[in-house]
Image (cartoon, grey):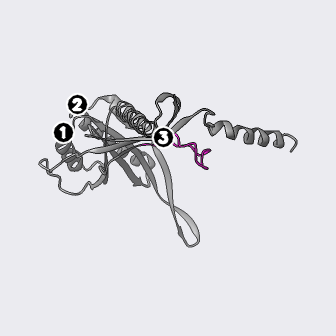
């Protein structure tokens, strides 16, 4: 207990520093925001391959066989090995109670496979191939952008430009001239929740869906990836001249 008091005191003393106090000289504090739309250029297929059998070796062999079938099918669409990720096998015995005794009913063997498709034009044919092969009962897909970092940097730059424009208008309305930025942050650390900082940027898009593998797939399935929105906020303190 003797060591808890200094630790707590140290934490409390650090909070004002974490809050980024405002400068003593004249300044303007603004929030800049931006939103841009981008077309998704990559889709991730997620398949769960699962078998339940009383014979563990047989269940494992079936999952391994379908996993290889999935990987081979994916490579036919030009998907590289580093765009295919498989988890380790998950083996779980299943039981049920009979006459108050636990009886083994089978072994559940499963693994998840994630596949990144970078050519969206191939989506209809690939989806049809995966569905027709009956490798998995469900196929989840999710659209995104391959180079998310570049898009984030672009929208952050736009948010900074918006912050500078806002600050300039405010300074001008008071007969002041905008000076250099005193602090720049992705975090709204002027609020009471400053110890729960989360970057104000987000990539949004309603692009995920689940397809039942037993459904008859059509390679002419209509597919429009649409657009995704990415937003960013920055909080900037500018000095006034």
Lateral position of residue 39 relative to residue 195, left or right: left
Closer to the camera: disc 3 or disc 1? 3
Q: Main secondary structure of the magenta part?
A: loop
Closer to the camera: disc 2 or disc 1? 1
State which quadrant residue 27 falls in: top right
Residue found at x 67% / y 36%: 17
Magenta residues span: 187-201
Q: Report the residue marked by disc 1.
A: 122
Q: Verify whether residue 100 appears in magenta.
A: no
Residue found at x 17% / y 39%: 121
Please name whichever residue, 166 or 201, is drawn nearer the observer in this view of the structure.
166
Residue found at x 36% / y 48%: 49
Lateral position of residue 44 relative to residue 3, left or right: left
Closer to the camera: disc 3 or disc 2? 3
Task: List x then y, in percent, for residue 223.
Answer: 18, 48
- Position of residue 155 relative to residue 106, above or below, is above
- The circle on residue 62 is none
Task: List x then y, in percent, for residue 31.
Answer: 46, 42
Mark 3 crowd level (few <14, some 14–19, many ≥20, 10 Å Cα)? some
State which quadrant residue 42 falls in: top left
Distance from the alpha carbon under mark 2 to that under mark 1: 10 Å
**Which element type, helix, strand or loop, lies under badge 2?**
loop
């Amino acid at each position: 207990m003797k060591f808890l008091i200094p630790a707590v005191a140290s934490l409390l003393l650090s909070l004002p520093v974490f809050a980024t106090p405002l400068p003593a000289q004249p300044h303007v504090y603004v929030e800049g925001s931006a939103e841009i739309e981008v077309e998704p250029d990559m889709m991730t297929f997620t398949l769960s391959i699962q078998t339940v059998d009383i014979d563990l070796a047989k269940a494992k062999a079936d999952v391994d066989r379908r996993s290889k079938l999935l990987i081979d099918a994916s490579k036919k669409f030009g998907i590289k090995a580093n765009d295919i990720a498989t988890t380790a096998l998950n083996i779980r015995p299943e039981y049920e109670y009979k006459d108050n005794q636990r009886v083994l009913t089978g072994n559940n063997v499963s693994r998840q496979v994630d596949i990144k498709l970078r050519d969206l034009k191939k989506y209809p044919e690939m989806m049809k191939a995966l569905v027709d092969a009956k490798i998995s009962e469900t196929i989840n897909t999710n659209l995104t952008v391959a180079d998310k970092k570049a898009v984030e940097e672009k929208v952050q730059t736009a948010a900074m430009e918006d912050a500078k424009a806002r600050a300039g208008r405010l300074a001008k309305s008071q007969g002041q001239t905008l000076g250099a930025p005193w602090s720049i942050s992705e975090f709204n650390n002027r609020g009471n929740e400053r110890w729960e900082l989360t970057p104000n940027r987000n990539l949004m898009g309603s692009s995920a869906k689940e397809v039942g593998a037993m459904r008859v797939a059509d390679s002419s399935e209509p597919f429009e990836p649409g657009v995704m929105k990415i937003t960013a906020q920055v909080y900037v303190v500018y000095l006034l001249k």
